[in-house]
Image (spheres, rainbow, N blue to C red):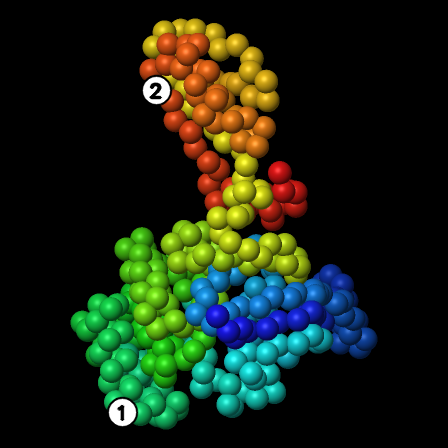
Amino acid sequence: MDRLITVEHLHKSYQISKRGKGIPGMLANLVAPRYEKKEAVKDISFQIAEGEMVGFIGPNGAGKSTTIKMLSGILHPDSGRILVDGKVPYRQRKQYVGNIGVVFGQKSQLQWDLPVIDSFELLKAIYRIPDQTYKRNLARFTEMLDMQEFLKQPVRQLSLGQRMRADIVAALLHDPKIVFFDEPTIGVDVVGKETIRTFIQELNAQDQITMLFTTHDMQDIEKTCKRLLIIDQGNKVYDGALSGIREMYGTTRTLDLELQTEVQVAPIPHVTISRPENSNSRKWQLQFDHHAVAVQELMGFLLATYPVRDLNISEPEIESIIRNIYGGRQPE
């Protein structure tokens, strides 16, 4: 696949007003304002190929939204290089915006007091979308997102899930090659989230639209993206396959064991044995690193040694792995 997005050594910092407490501090700040520098993005580099769908995550304040705004041409970087579809976003913004779509979950591009369809018509005029393209996309997207019933309702009367669906369609009417999603499912109910995720998956598969997906909901990432970019405190800490992150950071496995009778489980090398909280005396929990202990051998040993009633192996949840990365945990 052709490389569509190139980011090299990207830096962005802000000046934040620093003032003393109370009225004296306010007055002193008016006479001689003081500022401190905050680095939002520190030397980030990555490439995204055409048609890729990439999850872009990090804790609050990590620099995700700042990076998205630089990629979409809203902000200028302090230094570094951005090239998207052959254009520098912040220098060639007029030519560039016709090829991108942006969905900010907390900021709508729809007109609050107008019906949804009127906002779409306004965007048609702004982007100079040909009639045939507009009608085709409107019909297709409203059907895929089940929006027919509220197209003529004012935006202010919509539920959050309905508004988000309308915002996504608004970002796609002009056939962009690239779409930046910033928290597109924030606050949306379970059914609404699943509808949006399915739509994004289908659109990527059918149209090969390149997507960068920022979210705090890891189910969004697991159900839509194969590649994951993680940043923390302005630095890139992971760039690779979603499956690979478990191998690097989530090698611990938990085996829940239930015996037919009350039997003490003897120590096993490289395995931590404990009793689960609020369980009966026949249940045990065994934790181990699957690089140090072969799962099949451990299960075979337990079945041959103890009167096993049931056993179950589980991997760590992706959310807990990500939390460990944010906390500075090193790969196992």
> In the image, what residue occupies the spot 69% across and 64% down?
42
| Residue ID at (31%, 92%) | 130
Camera sees residue 17: no
Mark 2 secondary-structure assignment: strand
- Give x and y (percent) for residue 155: 30, 75
Q: Residue furthest right?
A: 32
Report the mark closest to the observer, 2 or 1: 2
**Horizontal placement of 37 versus 92: left or right?**
right
Image-based side of 11 in relation to 167, left or right: right
Regarding residue 129, the answer to whether it shows in the image is: yes
Depth check: 275 or 272 in front? 272
Q: Is residue 64 above or below residue 135?
A: above
Callout 2 crowding tier (Cα within 10 Å): few <14, some 14–19, many ≥20? few
Residue 114: x %, y % from top left: 29, 82
Query: Relative to residue 87, is residue 78 depicted above or below?
Result: above
Quarter location, residue 208:
bottom left
Residue holding disc 1:
131
Rendering coords of residue 204 (x, y %)? 37, 68
Res. 177 image quadrant: bottom left
Q: According to the image, label 2 marks what residue? A: 310
Residue closer to the observer: 264 or 34: 264
Residue drawn where x is 69% and y is 69% of the image: 9
Disc 1 crowd, CA 10 A, few/some/many (<14, 14-19, 20+): few
* Mark number displayed over residue 58: none
Residue at the limit of the structure toward the left, as seen here: 149
191 or 15: nearer the eye?
191
Upstream in sequence: badge 2 or badge 1: 1
